[in-house]
Amino acid sequence: MSANPRETGTAPSSRAGPREWTGLGVLALPTILLGLDVTLLYLALPALSVDLQPTSTQALWILDSYGLVIAGLLVTMGSIGDRLGRRRLLMIGTAAFGIVSIVAAFAPSAEILIAARALLGVAGATLMPSCLALITNMFTDARQRALAIGVWATTFALGMAAGPLVGGVLLESFWWGSAFLLALPIAALVLLTAPVLLPEYRAADAGRVDLLSVALSLGAILPLVYAIKHAATHGFDTQTTVTLVASAVFTVVFVRRQRRLSDPLLDVALFTNRASGTALGVLLVGLVGVGGALYLVTQHLQLVEALSPLAAGAWMGPPALAMVVAAIGAPLLARRVRPGYVVSGTLVLSTLGYVLLTQVHGPNSIGLLVSGFALVYLGFGSVGALGSDLVVGTTPAHRAGSAAAMSETVQELGVAMGVAMLGSLTTLVYRNQMRVTAPTEGGPGGAAPAVSESLAGATSTPQVPPALLSQAKEAFTAGLNISAAVTGAAILALATMAAVVLRQIPPTGRSVPAEPSAPAPSTRGTGHADFSSGS
């Protein structure tokens, strides 16, 4: 069977037309929805903390359960999309996301909200790989594909930019659950337009999904995050060690099984290609920093600066605008400058942003806080746009679903890990500083446990003395400073790696020299793609 250009990854001559670009607008809708969901919940956390009274660990799980389940299932959903049909899976996931959003909006307890967030993660896992893989089907010209992915990544930034503003308005007038109900009109619009404007694609000879691989992938990810959270609360004890070892064992078994399967859930050969492997590493580490910083900055604006949700959302606008500019500009700049240098340069700017965050001290630091976070977001916009194209652009068309899923997996895992790691580090610093003060100065009515637990607990407890509340804010800010310093050092190292390893990748649209170490692209199957609404 002969291979066509789309199967081998060479640039075909066909260019996308008006229908493909209109279809890109449809794919932007669920992406905007996911962007909205991120920032809306971060701003809603203080309000729902007052209503549901979650512990600090439960508050992190409310944020993390969504991203962690997505990260654990994205590869699975990418493979299912290759088999079931990428458009069909997109529509199924969109409908499920809308239904579960209703459950989350009316959750009566922290436990039910965590469960609903996990189910939203299952639904959300179908959206991102389907969107990114369909883009590779619709835009086969290298330059058009790079621009389309940049535009698509920008819509996520737009969702994050609109989220704080829209969420602030909602939280000023309604309860925190109204943030979840925004999914309903967006989901309805996707379900109406997708059958008309999006092509269906499925791999012609795709095998069955290996359920054991699915279980092993979850076994590798979930114990790792649990260990991080447990260590932040209880220290590095036996339970932490056991869960870390379990995660490592599941990871080794998962990788070995993928190497043996003829049709693996995850094509580990992606990691043997220098471009895609390095891009995945940049996406993962970069998003760890962004996810943690987003969580800490939004909490600082509301809990330390004591801003309303609407005011906090307005201050999040400039950083989101910086991310939009980078997501649009990076693919255009990469047409003339090597992508590795573009990524490295923006990561250096992100490092400067983390340096600024280390200088934030208590209240009245909004300008410094927002400026630093804007630089952090600038790097995220560039990495998100160019990193995804580097991963997907070096993959055969019939494996694009798995490659797109892997790209989105490391991004979602990075955000979730960032919240877990930097949130836990900040909590550890906070508790160490408040351990001596709170029990003796906790005030009447048993306020000491709330003050010792978290800043959210301290600010939601009316009987906390003002002096102690000020100390709690200083302790939280100290945790933010330390987390920013650690992350900044890691991002600077990442910028160096991107400049060195990715320097051989030419500007977009130019031919890429073959790497001797990379396996030859698979030519198995021709796949099936069409724009008919009934496929």
Image (cartoon, rainbow, N blue to C red):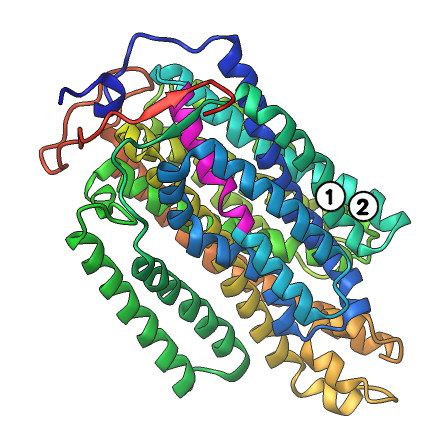
| Image quadrant where residue 250 sits | bottom left
Under circle 1, the secondary element is helix
| Contact between labelled residues 2 and 1, with CB atoms less than 8 Å apart | yes
Under circle 2, the secondary element is helix
Residue depicted at 39% across the width and 28% down the height = 201
Residue with the most extreme left position: 516
Label 1 crowd (10 A; few <14 / some 14-19 / many >=20): many
Q: Is residue 273 visible?
A: yes
Part of the protein shown in magenta: 123-138
Q: Position of residue 181 (x, y in %)?
A: 75, 46
Figure label count: 2
Identify the residue position indicated by label 2 in the image. Answer: 168
Q: Position of residue 238 (x, y in %)?
A: 39, 87
Query: Type of residue at label 2?
Result: Gly
In the image, is residue 350 part of the stretch drawn in magenta? no
Distance, label 1 to label 2, CA atoms, is 6 Å
Left or right, 30 with respect to 189, comes to left
Residue depicted at 47% across the width and 55% down the height = 487
Identify the residue position indicated by label 1 in the image. Answer: 164
Considering the image in quadrants, where does the C terminus appear? top left
Considering the image in quadrants, where does the N terminus appear? top left
Left or right, 102 with respect to 175, comes to left
Q: Position of residue 408 (x, y in %)?
A: 43, 43
| Image quadrant where residue 134 sits | top left
Label 2 crowd (10 A; few <14 / some 14-19 / many >=20): many
Query: Type of residue at label 1?
Result: Pro
